[in-house]
Image (cartoon, helix red, strand yellow):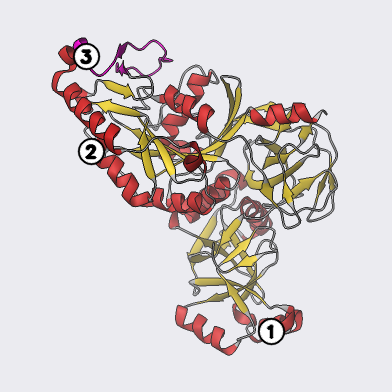
Amino acid sequence: MLMSEIAKQVRRRRTFAIISHPDAGKTTLTEKLLLFSGAINIAGSVKARKAVRHATSDWMEIEKQRGISVASSVMQMEYRDCVINLLDTPGHQDFSEDTYRVLTAVDAALMVIDAANGVEPQTRRLLQVCRARNTPILTFVNKMDREVQGPLDVMDEVERELGMTVVPFTWPVGMGKRFHGVYDRRTDQMRVFSGGNDKRGGDEEVLSGLNNAEALKRFGAEFEDAKGELELINGASPEFDLKAFLAGEQTPMLFGSAVNNFGVREVLDALVDLAPAPEKRTTLQRTVEPTESKFTGVVFKIQANMDPAHRDRIAFVRVASGHFVRGMKLKVVRSGKELRPSTVVSFLSQRRELLEEAYAGDIIGIPNHGVLQLGDTLTEGETLQFTGLPFFAPEMIRTVEVADPLRTKQLRAGLTQLGEEGAIQVFRPVAGTVLLLGAVGQLQFEVVAHRLQTEYGVKARIGNSSYSLARWVTCSPEEGGETELKRFMAANAHRIALDAVDAPTLLVDHSATLRAVEANWPKIKFHTMREHAGLVFQKSM
């Protein structure tokens, strides 16, 4: 294919994730973005648990029951000649690992803040990940149709908490019952708010200028207040600087109400205008440019049972360069195996469409029967290994046993698949038969137990274990390498387990025990994080 065609297609791509604290309205906003782009015609609401229409992005059974997003989902849509790949991430902190991995596959993030609660803990954590990668961030302040904090307070808090300069693109006029609309600083127009869930927008009433007599007459004190705040901002806030935004130092801020579909189109426009097209990516061997002619991609997520009838597993691949065509020959670099994926899918959440081609920035789904793992690199033959997909040492460890011993095999198969997905970490003790599960939060265990039962027909008993900490262990060649590591594992066999990629892991009951083991074995390195490929260990991010 001509390079110029690849470059043209890459320029059209925008790949971003939506991040927020639980309940800030992230899934609702996702729905509305899809509505605007024409991808869905009627937006599902999240709230009603037994509602007939669930949000498009929450498709897993447990999500419909609880009204929360537990697995990140991917949606693709077209808007203004751009192809937008939108990744919705779980807000709940127990699923933060999945979110961290998703953030490695995007070029920008859209942060949703609940105007009543301001910046919440989970938002902070996610932001740290974005900042570590210098990901550009757009901010959407949601729920302006409720009684919330003043916009200046929200703006101040974002600046203080996140250490970024905020440049308001729009400004609210009033709030709660007296929310009248937003003033667009770039066009000097006020768009008048009217409630209503399923309208596409574009038909809002517009009033021009800050000295508009009609606006003053209709909205009185709220318009006066907004006018005063805007004059203050015009004097005090910096001009928008695209360079600073792309470096993750400045964030444009927009106000609105997702549930009423108000302010959403502006978000889409800002994403298309400002967010970067796919950029170069690092591998252990070299830097990969998106416009290269050869295809490369990285598996950043594996999702089991998207179609419960077929027990299938889908590997989500971020295309890093080149042009993907259905049926092309690909090499899995880790194993050296060849793939010719013929049923490759693009997503509108669970609705899938067969995909003929894809370019850098796109997210494609390859059906996977155990050939692909998290962190795998796919190429047309070159040996490359993309970096940066983290796995964190679990903070909770539990035992798992099967209620019916005849279903032991199903339990192992189910756990292997859920472990590949990264939903949970599965450890096999070297001495002993009981499998151990590691997770960041309690909710993960509940989800795993629920999924084992509904998807694999296995009733599992999850019990307390005597371990509370895990560390991956390695030994560098200069310190004795494999021989020293084997000696360490033999001496500590009662507390060694192997994880999904057979990486040796030390399990201990207490931090004091860990300190003692570290002191006794100075040549062994203990890691709180490993990369998915199992290759690169690092102390911290």
Residue at (57, 63) in percent of width and height: 401
Give, as a three-letter code, the residue at label 3.
Ala
Element under disc 3 = helix
Q: Residues within 10 Å of mark 2 (few under 14, many from 20)?
A: some
Give, as a three-letter code, the residue at label 2.
Gln
Q: Nearer the viewer, residue 254 or 539?
A: 254
Residue 201 pos. (x, y %): 41, 15
Contact? badges 3 and 2 (CB < 8 Å): no
Which residue in the structure is indicated by mark 2? 149
Q: Specify start and end residues of the magenta stretch as a single range.
A: 189-214
Element under disc 1 = helix
Q: Residues within 10 Å of mark 3 (few under 14, many from 20)?
A: many
Does label 1 or label 2 sit earlier along the sequence? 2
Which residue in the structure is indicated by mark 1? 490
Give the quarter of the image for residue 392: bottom right
What mark, if any, has residue 161 been given in the picture? Answer: none
Which residue in the structure is indicated by mark 3? 215
Residue 45 pos. (x, y %): 41, 27
Name the image quarter holding the N terminus: top right
